[in-house]
Image (spheres, rainbow, N blue to C red):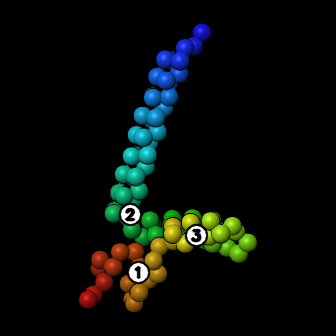
Amino acid sequence: MTTLASHATTLGILAQYLTIAFAVMCAAAYVLHDRAPALSRRLRVAMAIPMVREGRPAWMRALGQRIAPPTAKGKTCGSCSGCAPD
């Protein structure tokens, strides 16, 4: 038989695993953005384009616009502007 205490322990462990998984995903996203900005930009564009198409719900279009990277300005590649001349 399972008791209330065992369910609480199971939920606590699940919460710990979810928190750790979220922290690892955030760290991986940061490293990807920092070390491979062009790849990060391409991935963001690939995720955003299907979300902002006509006929999608408003919440999905708003999320797609938030995910989409900023537009490129000038002659830079648009990923970080770190190598662009001033």
Q: Residue at x 46, y 70 (%)?
A: 41
In the rendered view, would you say 21 is above or below 57? above
Q: Residue at x 43, y 49 (%)?
A: 25
Density class for disc 2 (Cα within 10 Å; few <14, some 14-19, many ≥20) is some
**In this rendering, which labeled residue sits more in front, label 1 or label 3?**
3
Residue 29 shows up from this direction: yes
Looking at the image, tell me whether mark 1 or mark 2 is earlier in sequence order: 2
Residue, far right:
55
Report the residue marked by disc 2.
33
**In this rendering, which labeled residue sits more in front, label 2 or label 3?**
3
In the rendered view, would you say 75 is above or below 59? below
Given the image, on which type of amino acid does mark 1 rest? Cys
For the C terminus, the image quarter is bottom left
Q: Secondary structure at mark 3?
A: helix
Density class for disc 1 (Cα within 10 Å; few <14, some 14-19, many ≥20) is some
What x and y, as percent, mark residue 70?
45, 77
Q: Nearer the viewer, residue 2 or 83?
A: 2
Density class for disc 3 (Cα within 10 Å; few <14, some 14-19, many ≥20) is some
Report the residue marked by disc 3.
62
In the rendered view, would you say 79 is above or below 35? below
CA gap, disc 2 and disc 3 = 22 Å
What x and y, as percent, mark residue 32?
39, 59
What x and y, as percent, mark residue 6?
50, 17
Given the image, on which type of amino acid does mark 3 rest? Ala
Given the image, on which type of amino acid does mark 2 rest? His
